Image (tube, grey):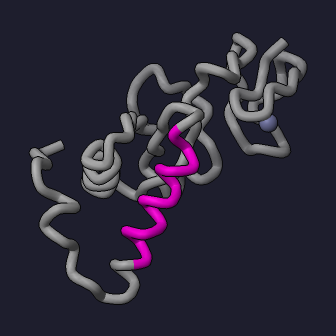
Amino acid sequence: MRYCPECGAAYEDQVAACPRCRAVLEAEPPDRARQPEVVHRVPDAAAGALLCGILEHHGVRAMLKSATLPGYGSVRRDWSTTAWGEILVAHEDAVEARALIADYLAALERGGEVRDEDVEGLGPA
Ligand SMILES: [Zn+2]
């Protein structure tokens, strides 16, 4: 059996991805309490590093996971044609992380400047 890392549903081995979540199935069932949660998908490494930096700056431990890294799995999610990777945070931080990212993206869409305090301390990826 293989398991959806997002909803925990179990499927036959030949099923590659959860039809509901579109998540690639994993060999182990998820431990929902400790499972990091995907809060955002990013188009490239630079965007991922930037958003992770913003989260870290606000005290949210973020992890950037690239869909192109070896070991991620040969079956890529269907979003991978447009997304480079994803940002994961601890389950309990997910709501805050999504809000921080939404605020940041909303500011960008307004054409606002990225404030210094949003990006300070960010090094190269
Ligand atoms: Zn699922």
Instruction: Read off the magenta span.
Output: 93-106
Left or right: 66 with respect to 59?
A: right
At 68% from the left and 16% from the top, the residue drawn is: 31
Q: x, y percentage for residue 69?
A: 39, 30
At 57% from the left and 49% from the top, the residue drawn is: 95
- Of the pair 52 and 72, the residue shown nearer to us: 52
Above or below, comparing residue 55 to residue 71 in the picture: below
Locate the N terminus by quadrant: top right
Left or right: 121 with respect to 107?
A: left
Locate the C terminus by quadrant: top left
Q: Quadrant of ligand 1?
A: top right
Left or right: 39 with respect to 22?
A: left
- Of the pair 62 and 42, the residue shown nearer to us: 62
Q: x, y percentage for residue 50?
A: 26, 54
Quadrant location of residue 32?
top right
Above or below, comparing residue 35 to residue 7 in the picture: above
At 62% from the left and 32% from the top, the residue drawn is: 75
At 14% from the left and 49% from the top, the residue drawn is: 122
The prevailing secondary structure element of the residues shown in magenta is helix
In the picture as drawn, the residue positioned furthest to the bottom comes out as 110
- The answer to whether residue 104 is magenta is yes
